[in-house]
Amino acid sequence: MPHLPPDEHLPRTRLLFALTAERLSAYYEYATWMTDAQAVQLTSLWLTRTRVALTVREKRQFAELSDAFARELAESVSREAGLFISHELMQALDPDYQSAIAIDVMNDCDARLRDAGLNETPDAQ
């Protein structure tokens, strides 16, 4: 079962990061995009291991946000760069792995959640 990234970030941010990483990885490995239904299913698996509760609507919003972000990343770089970014993000799901790229993507996840009104305060954990 995949892991969420380290605990320094809020659970919702970590979830969006992980979904984006998984989508990007699947795209480069299988040359096809994960469906929103698959992302919602993956979200449900991760949520069983956290204290975060999301409504079905929120799960769909996370699926849509992660899809848009992964596609944006893939479209903005060469295939080689995309493969490297995908690898870095998947490695960063391990709490012992440090990556400047992953930190940038995590910060972008924070901003995207704020813009979508899906962010949380530290008290909400």
Image (cartoon, grey):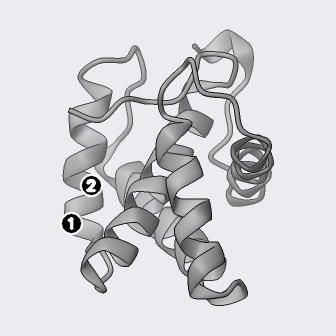
Neighbours of disc 1 within 10 Å: few (<14), some (14-19), many (20+): few
Q: Amino acid at mark 2?
A: Val
Residues at badges 2 and 1 in contact (C-beta under 8 Å)?
yes
Say if 7 sits above or below 63 in the image: above
Q: Which residue is mark 1?
A: 37
Q: CA distance from mark 2 to mark 1?
A: 5 Å
| Residue 16 shows in the view | no
Q: Nearer the viewer, residue 124 or 40?
A: 40
| Location of residue 37 with respect to 101 vertically, above or below | below
Q: Secondary structure at mark 2?
A: helix
Q: Picture coordinates of residue 31 (x, y %)?
A: 30, 86
Image position, residue 106 (x, y; %): 70, 43
Whether residue 74 is visible here, answered yes or no, is: yes
Residue 72 x, y percent position in the rendering: 64, 80
User: Which class describes the residues within 10 Å of circle 2: few (<14), some (14-19), or many (20+)?
Assistant: many
Camera-side residue of 28 and 64: 28
Q: Percent x, y for residue 81?
A: 65, 75
Which image quadrant: the N terminus?
Answer: top left
Image disc number at residue 106 = none
Residue 43: which quarter of the image? top left
Q: Name the residue: 68% across, 59% down.
A: 116
Q: Is residue 60 above or below residue 67?
A: above
- Identified at 63% across, 89% down, the residue is 75
The residue at which mark 2 appears reads as: 40
Inspect the image, locate mark 1, and give the three-letter code of the amino acid beneath it: Ala
- Camera-side residue of 118 and 35: 35
In this view, the residue farthest toward the front is: 80
Along the horizontal axis of the image, is 76 left or right of 92? right
Q: Secondary structure at mark 1?
A: helix
At x 68%, y 24%, the residue is 9
From the viewer's perspective, is 90 left or right of 107?
left
Quadrant placement of the C terminus: top right
